[in-house]
Amino acid sequence: MIYGDGRQYIDGVLKPLGIKPSVVIDIQTYHDNPARLEIAEDFGRLNRNSPGDHNNDGYDETSGAYQIIASGPRLEFTLSPRSGLLVRPVVEIAGLPAGPLSATMDGRWVDRMVHLENGSVLIELPGESAFPVTVNVKVGQ
């Protein structure tokens, strides 16, 4: 899969397309040290068993995306950098009901969302942050 910013992972290796080298270094550093994702049980849970999650932390190294299983139409989670920056995190969410989707990151609208053929939703979060960010996802009006 190729993400909207030109990232793609082939067998877990970053293969950027048209991304500045300085940004590629930041993305690779982030991929090697993904953030800690915290989610309240009421909203869902991390999927620590995806085939590409090499260390059962909820981050699938082969796709470069966090894996979440939602328990309803609303979701809130926090991403906290372990080292360095959060750099354009990607989150794949299974279990959301069908319907119009909206998402914010620290109150800012997120516009890169896509429904995948398997029923999951893929969200590409914007920008970089040295601090924790809170993401809210909602299905419906």
Image (tube, rainbow, N blue to C red):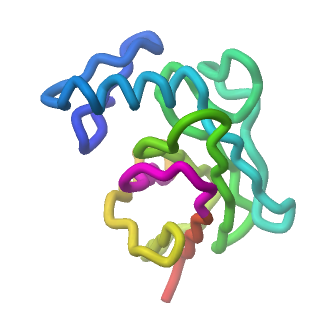
Res 101 → quadrant: bottom left
What x and y, as percent, mark residue 11?
Answer: 44, 10
Counting labels gives 0
Q: Nearer the viewer, residue 59 or 25?
A: 25
At 58% from the left edge and 70% from the top edge, which residue is drawn? 136
Q: Which residue lies most toward the left here?
A: 18
At 56% from the left edge and 69% from the top edge, which residue is drawn? 137
Residues in magenta, as a range = 121-133
Res 59 → quadrant: top right
At 26% from the left edge and 28% from the top edge, which residue is drawn? 22
Residue 134 included in the magenta stretch of the image: no
Determine whether 73 is above or below 10 in the image.
below
What x and y, as percent, mark residue 46?
Answer: 74, 44
What x and y, as percent, mark residue 26?
Answer: 39, 30
Relative side of 140 to 53, left or right: left
Q: Which residue lies most toward the right here?
A: 41
What x and y, as percent, mark residue 105?
Answer: 50, 67
Determine whether 138 is above or below 1 in the image.
below
Residue 124 included in the magenta stretch of the image: yes
